[in-house]
Image (cartoon, rainbow, N blue to C red):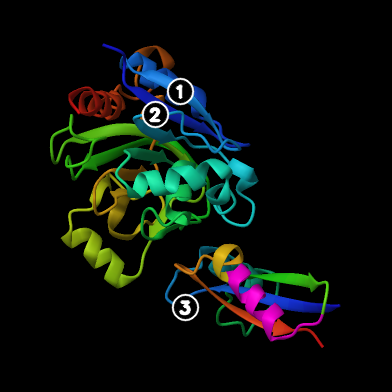
Amino acid sequence: MSAARVGVVTFPGTLDDQDAARAVRHAGGEAVPLWHADRDLKGVDAVFLPGGFSYGDYLRCGAISRFAPLMEELIPAARAGLPVLGTCNGFQILCEAHLLPGALMRNAGLHYICRDQGIRVESTATPWTSDFTEGQEIVLPIKHGEGRYVADETTLAALEAGGQVVFRYVGGNPNGSLDDIAGIRNEAGNVVGLMPHPEHAVEDLTGAPSTDGRGFFTSILKKLVNA
Amino acid sequence: MARVIVDVMLKPEILDAQGQAIARALPRLGFSGVSAVRQGKRFEVELDGPADEAALSDVRKMAETLLANTVIEDFTVTVEE
């Protein structure tokens, strides 16, 4: 049986694509490089939108990337159910593309934050979190200047009521996100975005605070193999 | 030829951390009497032709699509005299 194929998107200014591809391979999947300028998803089974500073964060984080040729393919595919995970800048792009509600703004303290962060998994009802248990606390690196999640009251209430808050910060809110939100999913559950970086926490060798990031990749690969 | 100005501001209910930092810096610089600052963006859009209703409609579409994120920001479009 061939390995599940997870696309990893590279925009100009993307930083974490190599780590993301490595994490996919580490979990036993095939990482397929996807290029921002190609209108081609190469038939992948899922897509990882990595972090970085795509298009230099010009205008707003993710505002330009959202209109990249690849996104013209990815947006309808995601709406049709393709599993998509966006971390950090990838999360920002998903919000700008309106695949996820709300927006990410400058950290309340204005500082860029790079540290290990406690996160609680609030929902395992996504293809990216099924290997965790609800309420499980994990530690992942965060590194961002614009990670403060905001949404209007109605949207926020709908997210909470619908179980769409997937991750919450524990042990201190690093950026002023509403309701300590670290990550959310769309209504269908196939699109997930979070500020922390699972792809940096899959191997002890790299000095990561944990290997808790592995759960994201084992979750999606199990889902795809069983699909 | 006409110039159209698009001003983009955070919605009033959205915390403007940068504006607050600027407001806090002003007293230290000796400027008093400022109760609040909010920071926004200004775009100067140069048109090939006149700023007629069709052109302004296009600019509003640009603002909605790219210049502003209407989830968190409001915008106004004005023609520069």
User: Secondary structure under badge 1?
Assistant: strand
Q: Residue furthest bottom?
A: B81
Res B50 quadrant in image: bottom right
Residue A32 - label = 1
Of the residues shown, which amino acid type is indicated by label 2?
Answer: Val
Label 3 sits on residue:
B12
Q: Within the image, what quadrant is residue B68 found in?
A: bottom right
Q: Residue A103 location in percent, x, y?
A: 43, 58
Seen from the viewer's position, the closer of residues A173 and A57 is A57
Q: Position of residue A214 (x, y in %)?
A: 29, 23
Q: Which residue is labeled 2 in the image?
A: A44
* A24 in relation to A38, above or below: above
Residue B26, image quadrant? bottom right
**Range shown magenta:** B50-63
Q: Residue at x 20, y 59 (%)?
A: A160
User: Distance from label 3 to label 1 (Cα)?
Assistant: 43 Å
User: Vertical placement of A57 versus A176: above or below?
Assistant: above
Is residue B39 in view from this perspective? no
At horizontal 40% and vertical 49% (from top left) the residue drawn is A76
> Are both tags, 3 and 2, on one chain?
no
Q: What percent of the width, then of the height, locates residue A111?
A: 52, 49
